[in-house]
Image (cartoon, rainbow, N blue to C red):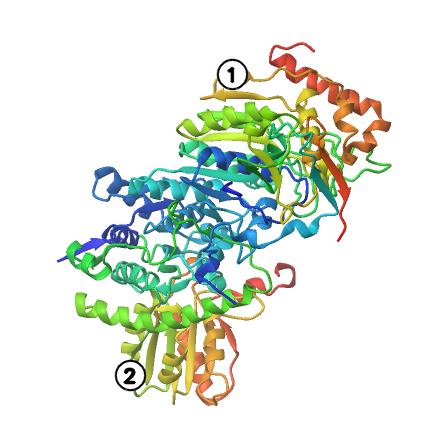
Amino acid sequence: MKITRGAVVEEAGNSIENKTGTWRTFKPIIDYNKCIRCMVCWEFCPEPSIYKEDGSEKPAPNEALKKLPVPVIDYDYCKGCGICVNECPVKAIEFVKEVK
Amino acid sequence: MKTMLRGNESVAYAFKLARIDVFPMFPITPSTLVPEMISKFVANGELDAEFIPLDSEHSAISAAIGASLKGARVGTATASQGLALMHEILFIASGMRLPIVMGIGNRALSAPINIWCDHQDTIAQRDTGWLQFYAESNQEGLDLILMAFKISEDKRVLLPSMVGLDAFVLTHTMEPVDIPEQSKVDEFLGEFKPNYRILDTKNPATFGAFGSPRHYMEFKYAQHLAMQAASHVIDEVFEEFERKFGRKYSKITEEFTEDADIVFITMGSCTGTAREFIKMKRKEGKKIGLIKLTVFRPFPKDELRKALKGKKVVAVVDRNFSPGFGGAVYGEVLATMYGRDEPKIIDFIVGLGGRDITFDTFEKILEITEKGLEGSVEEINWIEVDKEAVEKEEMI
Amino acid sequence: MKNDWLFAPGHGLCAGCAIPIIVKHILAISGENTIVVNATGCLEVATTEYPRTAWRVPWVHVAFENAAAVASGIEAAMKKKGEKANIICFGGDGGTADIGIQALSGMVERGHNVLYVMYDNEAYMNTGIQRSGATPYGAWTTTSEVGKANPIGNARPKKPVAEIMVAHRASYVATVNVAFIRDFKKKVEKALKTEGPRFIHAISTCPTGWRSDPSKSIEIIKLATETGLFPLWESENGEEIKITYKPKFLPVEEYLKAQGRFRHLLKNPEYIEKIKEDIKQWWRRHGVEI
């Protein structure tokens, strides 16, 4: 057990060791054939567990969109709140029951 | 050369000599002159510090924590209700291990509201994890504030300290005080370089985290060890202070105890009266000794056990009381001496709410104590209280 | 970088809680040169359980009621050392509107160079949904229970903390709603560029306490503004407030019915009428007829 003087947490941002994805009962899945890469999901993800991927090989509804960064869900942390599902303007995110 | 100073002025000079960086404050009788003087020092440019006049003592101690965590040397002053209002945050200052130093004008607590001297305010903060020092004189007030910084800032300790000066008897009374030279104080304290983790944007850390049952006790045990270490550090710092400034301090000061059967234990300004009283009585052939407690936390158990060995009766002079028990110092002495047949320990509650402690007071204490030499006496004795006025049924 | 927010994932805030959305955006704008002071509350408890922290900037929590005082001390120490950084306080509505209002008032009055952000989920959520001074009229909480003798729930209007800060002549005061992200970011940028004491009031959905669907957290606060119930405005140096967004003035029922805490009101149209009247009056005072 590591005890620091005055209970200081010395390593910034080490909460990434907590894999809060285990909380999930529903899982958001991005359909990249529909995703217009507007990043609304990235903007509103509370964890934050959606990151931007540059130069992605992922499919897109059209070639021009492929130049844009694509949102990727990090399931290690996604608690499955569904905000991204609700806010997606093109309904490109499916919300399915988590199978564990 | 000595200067005539009020106790509050001694404290203010000590803060100036310690070159504090930040002084958060809220005014309260009887310690108000401390912040007034610091305000003047800062306005004059005599002291390069940030003076923050806060909205309450609670906010003052909170700001002290913020400033200390940003790596500032921090002093503040308060008393009585103000200290009570700080209560919650005092635990946090010690739990976060911050070397804040606070001057106290020891004053009674309401109700009824009372601005005069007793030790109830600091005694009530006994378990907050602060080191506690009590001054007998204004010189001690100044010296103890300086030493408190050195002790609190020691890496083995890193706990906050409070230094008590009796309300009015010291805070408002002129006494000759030697104000040490700045260069000597600088040499003694050194430039303040925090030896603890601070709020630093280049090296971010989290302070004041949430401690679950898995870790909480370890942090408290660490505080316990730091208090134990403080006991040794206090000795070292007292010795160094004596070498540099020529004034001797110890956690307990024994006088006339060598051949004494009876020992008085005092804290704060009434020690002077006790000393003169004992000198007078010794001329009459009475073998009375005196122990002055300068350090109340960490409690000087070992020193007391040594000093009280072979003594017959101890009269503990308590300028405070814990309702439902008795005096707090009495309780500590009892616990310290537990399991030893001698001495007999008797408690005297005196001088609450600024009632004077005089030769007459000690005469009464001695009378009961001498009875204690022969036979049994009351455990807890309220001295110079109009018991008759109270003991009418309808008055209680 | 996979995750470059200054607020890291792995914290314990409830799914759908809007607080981290507010915090991550504010930190993204303020950057690494920021010190955060956090009042006791959901955000503090859920992000810093020893030995872990979600914070990638220096962060300190002391107690419930004193974030503004702690920030005052930090700012003073920085002044003494000649250092500069953004000092941002985060406090919930309880820690700000109620128990922390004295320290906040003092900090603003003394003019400390601090940005105070109140994330307002309209009750003491950390302790289990007890009413605060910022709980709105008609809301159920565990200390404004609804029953035969009290069909309203919380019978008092919300304390207008941001307006109280305007009365303090804070150098910048704004209400923000993260659902209106452009307005939100613009105001945070402005607040961070302004010197002196600044105050931001951010509405924040609490699915647990509002009895709402976590996936609707953004949709619901969007409705709070679109119904006229949570107006977006700003004010500088105590000047009259300026509306920054003209709502659609959707029927307030849209907002109320999305939340279980208002369910009892739907059976009592007179209470809903009162809410509508309050909205009308607020906008009338600010020159808008609905």
- Residue B179 visible somewhere in the drawing: no
Amino acid type, residue under disc 1 in the picture: Glu
Q: Chain of mark 1?
A: C
**Measuring 24% from the left and 59% from the top, which residue is drawn there?**
B189
Quadrant in the picture for the N terminus of chain B: bottom left
- Say which of A19 and B376 sits in front: A19
- Residue neighbourhood size for the residue with mark 1, other residues' Cα within 10 Å, grouped as few (<14), some (14–19), many (≥20): few
What residue is drawn where x is 64% and y is 30%? A60
Compared to B298, does B288 lie above or below? below
Name the residue nearer the viewer: B377 or C215. Answer: C215
User: Mark number for residue C74?
Assistant: none
Label 1 and label 2: CA atoms lie apart by 82 Å
Locate residue C99, reporting x and y percent: 57, 41
The residue lying at 72 percent from left, 36 percent from top is: C215
Are both tags, 1 and 2, on one chain?
no
Q: Of helix, strand and loop, which one carries label 2?
A: loop
Q: From the image, tell me which residue sits under label 1.
A: C240
Camera-nearest residue between B341 and B50: B50
Dot 2 corresponds to which residue?
Answer: B284
Q: Nearer the viewer, residue B12 or B269?
A: B12
Residue B243, percent from left and from top:
18, 70
Which quarter of the picture shows residue B297? bottom left
Q: Amino acid at mark 2?
A: Glu
- Tell me: residue B343, above or below residue C250: below
* Image quadrant assignment for residue B299: bottom left
Task: Give the chain of mark 2.
Answer: B
Secondary structure category for the residue under label 1: loop
> CB under 8 Å between callouts 1 and 2?
no
How packed mark 2 is, by other alpha carbons closer than 10 Å (few <14, some 14-19, many 20 or more), is few
Q: Is residue B316 visible?
A: yes
